[in-house]
Image (cartoon, rainbow, N blue to C red):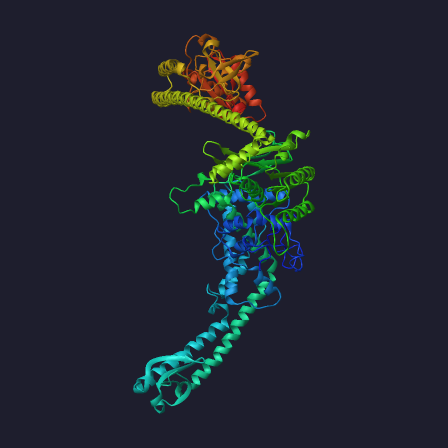
Amino acid sequence: MTSFVAAGVIGRVRGSSALCTTRAGDKRVRRAPVAGLGVQSNKPDTDPEEQVLDVEIESLNLLDWPEITKNVSRFACTDCGREVLAINMPLAESVEEAELLLLETHEATLIENSDLCLDFSGAGEIERYAQLASRGSSLSGTELARIADTLRSMRKNKRAIEDFADSEELIALVEVVADLSTKAELEREIRRCIDGEGRVLDSASRELCDLRNDAKDVQALIMTSLNETMARKRDALQDRIVTTRYDRFVLTVKASQKSKVPGVVHDSSSSGQTLYIEPKEVKEQNDRMRVLARKEQALVEKVLSDLSALVGNEADDLESVQYALTRLDLAQARARHSIALNAVQPKFSSGSSDEGYVLDLRGARHPLLLWQKRNSSEPGSDIDEVIPSDYKLFNGTKCAILTGPNTGGKTVCLKNLGAAVLMARAGLFVCAEKARFPFFDKVLADIGDDQSIVQSLSTFSGHVQRLKRILQSATPKSLVLLDEVGSGTDPAEGSALGMSLLQKLSNTVQLVMATTHHGELKTLKYADDKGRFENASVQFDDEKMRPTYKLIWGIPGRSNALSIASRLGLSKEIIDCAEDYLSGSSNKDVNMVIAALEKQRAELEELNKRLSEKEAEAEQAAKTWQEKVMAFEQEEKSERRRLRADLEKEFEAAKGEVRDVVRSMQKAGLSSKSANSARDQLVEMSDRLSKKTEGNKKNGFYEADNVKEGDLVCVERLGDSPVKVVEPPGPKGDVTVMLGQMKMKVKLEELLPVTSNNPSSAPGGLSARRSPAPAGFKRHRGSKKAAGKVSLVHVKTASNTVDIRGKRVDEALDSVREAINGAFGFGTMWIVHGHGTGALRQSVREMLKRSKLVQKFEDADRLDGGSGATVVYFK
């Protein structure tokens, strides 16, 4: 028997003492039986008339919990998991434990809905084997093979969960396997010695291998000798086959020919016509085989004993493996059950909710009714035929009184709520559209007729006995479900007793829901100034004269006894007479008021339905419009990307032309004429690209994800000067830029890239050399004289670069003078002097200040050497 029990939640979950494995013999062990077998408990057996039943276990049976558990057990994959569910599904004892179980179910659902699945093939119940081995017992080969298979299953599932956790957020299931040791060494050792069928392999030990080889040799000699005998004595043989008797090889000899085959008779056939004789020629070899067989058995037992000792040393870890596997199996079973019924994950409220409800259960269906429809062989049977119920109780409500006609579904409503609460406590998803309610530590029920001939209990007495046990067991967090409260006795006394009982329970438990036909109980709502009571009813269709099984809140129901009796065929004479008796009763007036309220409510529901339809139409229209806007924006973005791609192609082509110009300059030498010609070509390309950009600017050059804080851009309506982006585009596409000392917002489509005909100095003191340029270009640091026209695009080449690092000052200055004369036609020159002590850079720059050819000089860009190089701009 497994150590997991149904009376509490299984576990040895870290940090939760209540989630503990209950061992066999624990005094807390209680087991609820499967449906139909009555109720059992751990209390001593006593005389049936004096036996006190455990009301909690009894309530589980009344709410069909064993049947619900049975359906979940169909999804379990391991024997241990099925055994736990056969006893009864574990129920959490606190909200933290219930939330942990629900989280496990949720994560198992994620795995089930993925391409991955947990694999329990080969997993068995190994805890008992580990305990036996820890006490010194020797396990069989089959038991050891089962341990190896279980370890393999756990190892595969642990790896699967960890791999899945890399892409999805898993918490609970990862915690189950996090510190678990799957004992790979033990598994390998068992695999080395035992095959899948539990047989000890030759590889288990060298001695065993040698012994079995010897046995094969002896057996070969025996078979050779017997084959020769059969060839010589074929007439004396019944069949030409070799068989065994008592582990000795023998021949089948005709009884009449016994003398022709000398040897030992070990057996005979039932008819006596055949004798099994061991020829004397093989007696010695058979004796040898018996000796070898005994030695082999001893070696096999030693191998099994040694492996059992290893298992015993790892007993605690193997029990942890068994626990983890069972827990994973239960989580998967709960997940598969929830997926099959399209159930939702419930949430526990802390006593209030955002919508003002302490209990909000919408579209709830009983799982057994859903399974009944799913398993039905009737054509057209569908789970949607199960009518859902809504449960909505405002904060402060402690008691719901459900009234209405017989056969209207009141009892099902009670069981439906009880099943939902139990399923949430067990970690099962609830068969509903939405489920939010408090955590109930107990669900106590008085449903059905509890009369007993053996115990001399009437119906009323049976109810009173059960109510007494409920009052003794109830806690401030309990849910109490009472069916036909106050029934089975005088209506006046039963009504008074029911009112008193509900008053008491509303002060002592979390919530009580009761069904009744007593009209006086309907008035509790109006007599209680604390708002603890609420009325509800099951709807009845007056036109079709049948219940709709829908639950209606806020309005008490009518019994409709006469209508139902008429529908069931009771004579009209009796019905008419009953109506005459009822005509002078106040109940008739109350029923008329209730009927009017129901009619008014139906009209309001119809109005709400039409409003909902109009609202849905408006939402659909808004959705359609939004889709059109998004499609337009997407089309606009695609057009911008296309235009930008075209422009980038132009820039790439321009880069190629620049390279061609540079090559032409290098081939033509460094004459001023060739430099001026190259200058003209570059200016022409720059003009062409500027016109191309100007032609596309209305379509927007930038996209939101391409504009970053600190970028320099141009805004046409703000002039040609570059401005700095201080805030990237917001949700509406507005970009904040700095204009002088002032910030202002502009549209994203107004932004243009900084081109070469922008002034060299940007607002805020930022140099234009920091402005972005098309790929492959560098901006010319032009003079004021050149500001009115497009500036040159300067290219750094070996021809306009001089490296004076390592030279003396006078030698370096001579090199710079010579380089200036050669590079003047390029418009720009780079002098690489390095950092050093700074003396060489200072001397060079003093000379440049005195030169009449130099307009200005500055540190090179970071990529060109920074302060270790100087860029010279010629006039």
Where is residue 629? Give x, y as percent. 42, 20
As drawn, is 596 to the left or to the right of 653? right
As drawn, is 58 to the left or to the right of 376? right
Where is residue 273? Give x, y as percent. 35, 85
Residue 596 image-quadrant placement: top right
Residue 144 or residue 585, whichever sits in front: 585
Where is residue 199? Give x, y as percent. 47, 68
Query: Where 688 falls versus 312 (above or below)?
Result: above
Where is residue 162? Give x, y as percent. 52, 46
How many marks do you count on the picture? 0
Query: Where 235 falls versus 543 (above or below)?
Result: below
Residue 575 or residue 475, whichever sits in front: 575
* Residue 141 visible: yes
Point out the residue furthest to the left here.
Answer: 235
Residue 253 or residue 523, whichever sits in front: 523
Residue 655 image-quadrant placement: top left
Which part of the image, by quadrant, shows the C terminus? top left
Point out the residue furthest to the bottom here.
Answer: 259
Residue 660 or residue 520, whichever sits in front: 520
* Residue 509 visible: no
Residue 401 image-quadrant placement: top right
For the point 46% across and 65% down, the residue is 197
Which part of the image, by quadrant, shows the N terminus? bottom right
